[in-house]
């Protein structure tokens, strides 16, 4: 029998979304931990999905991150039923380096240079496939 208290794919997805929102507003794990009254290691465990996030704690997290709780659950139901869906931009921001790449990309003023950067990244992604 599986451990009912073990984290699941949904727990990992919630953690990714917490991380994405935290990065979106440029908040450190230490600052979020301080606001929640926990250690930054506990925040890491939440974000990795290693520890499940209780409903009351998720409300605290949402409040600290200035976002509605519902944002963390958007689109999860379709994923549970096995339906394929495109990843949300917020979910992609949780990946290492993505938020920094977006911030730097946004500073490029030339439309031509931005197009060429996108072409380069597409080519690099194709090489990995």
Image (spheres, helix red, strand yellow):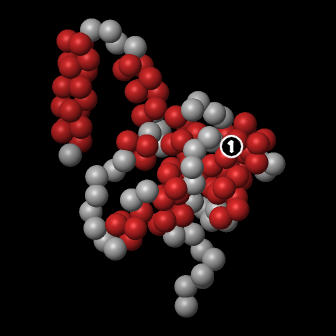
Q: Residue at x 51, y 70 (%)?
A: 8
Q: Residue at x 36, y 20 (%)?
A: 105
Residue 79 shows in this picture: yes
* Residue 115 drawn at (x, y percent): 20, 19
In the image, residue 111 above or below residue 30: above
State left or right for residue 51 relative to residue 99.
right
In the image, residue 112 above or below residue 91: above
Q: Residue at x 63, y 77 (%)?
A: 5
Q: Nearer the viewer, residue 45 or 13?
A: 13
Q: Residues within 10 Å of mark 1 (few under 14, many from 20)?
A: some
Q: Nearer the viewer, residue 63 or 80?
A: 63
- Which image quadrant for residue 57? bottom right
Residue 48 shows in this picture: no
Q: Residue at x 70, y 62 (%)?
A: 56
* Residue 100 drawn at (x, y percent): 46, 27
* Residue 113 drawn at (x, y percent): 24, 12
State left or right for residue 20 relative to residue 83.
right
State left or right for residue 45 relative to residue 106.
right
Hey, which residue is sitting farthest right in the picture? Answer: 37
State left or right for residue 88 relative to residue 129.
right
Hey, which residue is sitting farthest bottom in the picture? Answer: 1
Location of mark 1 (residue)? 64
In the image, residue 98 above or below residue 82: above
* Residue 37 drawn at (x, y percent): 81, 48
- Element at badge 1? helix
């Amino acid at each position: 029998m599986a451990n009912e208290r073990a984290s699941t794919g949904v727990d990992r997805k919630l953690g990714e979304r917490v991380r994405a929102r935290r990065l979106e507003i440029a908040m450190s794990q230490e600052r979020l931990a301080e606001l929640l009254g926990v250690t930054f290691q506990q925040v890491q465990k939440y974000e990795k999905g290693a520890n499940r996030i209780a409903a009351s704690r998720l409300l605290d997290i949402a409040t600290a991150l200035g976002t509605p709780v519902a944002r963390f659950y958007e689109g999860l139901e379709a994923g549970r039923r096995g339906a394929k869906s495109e990843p949300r931009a917020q979910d992609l921001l949780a990946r290492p380096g993505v938020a920094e790449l977006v911030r730097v990309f946004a500073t490029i003023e030339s439309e031509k240079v931005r197009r060429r950067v996108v072409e380069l990244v597409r080519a690099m992604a194709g090489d990995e496939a």
